[in-house]
Image (cartoon, rainbow, N blue to C red):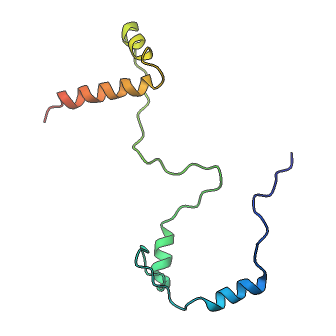
Amino acid sequence: MKREPTSKPLAFSKEQIAAAIAAAPDRANDPECPYDPNDAAAVAAFWAKGNVRLPGQRGQQKRPTKVPVTVRYSPEVVEYFKATGEGWQTRMNDALREYVEQHRVA
């Protein structure tokens, strides 16, 4: 199956684009910018930290990863948490985390 193009043709002519570029100021003044857009070295340093991702690729994980383990629980414990519905593993993790925080030795 042939894929449809995702981009649309430009709504502006080449002359309009050239005129907009010519009318643009020589220096940018953006106080919210994390770097000085007028300093080529600062721009390069800022963008050097970036990671390029292709469409469909996932980015870095925002939260720390969990550790996969194999454990055995009594059937009553598993049935109790499964009976609470969707997300029962997360609730089980939260219950264990709460227990650990209450019993952590300083």
Left of 95 or right of it: where is 18? right
Question: For this rendering, which residue is in front, 95 or 105?
Answer: 95
Residue located at (40% from left, 78% from top): 31
Q: Quadrant of residue 80?
A: top left
Residue located at (64% from left, 56% from top): 54
Q: Quadrant of residue 70?
A: top left
State whether residue 17 is above or below residue 87.
Answer: below
State whether residue 14 is above or below residue 75.
Answer: below
What is the tally of numbered marks visible in this picture? 0
State whether residue 46 is above or below residue 18.
Answer: above
Residue located at (42% from left, 40% from top): 65
Question: For this rendering, which residue is in front, 86 or 38?
Answer: 86
Q: Residue furthest left?
A: 106
Residue 67 in the image: x percent, y percent?
A: 41, 33
Residue located at (43% from left, 48% from top): 62
Give the position of the C terminus as an image quadrant: top left
Residue 89 in the image: x percent, y percent?
A: 43, 24
Left of 26 or right of it: where is 63? left
Give the position of the N terminus as an image quadrant: top right
Left of 99 or right of it: where is 3? right
Left of 68 or right of it: where is 97? left
Residue 46 in the image: x percent, y percent?
A: 46, 72
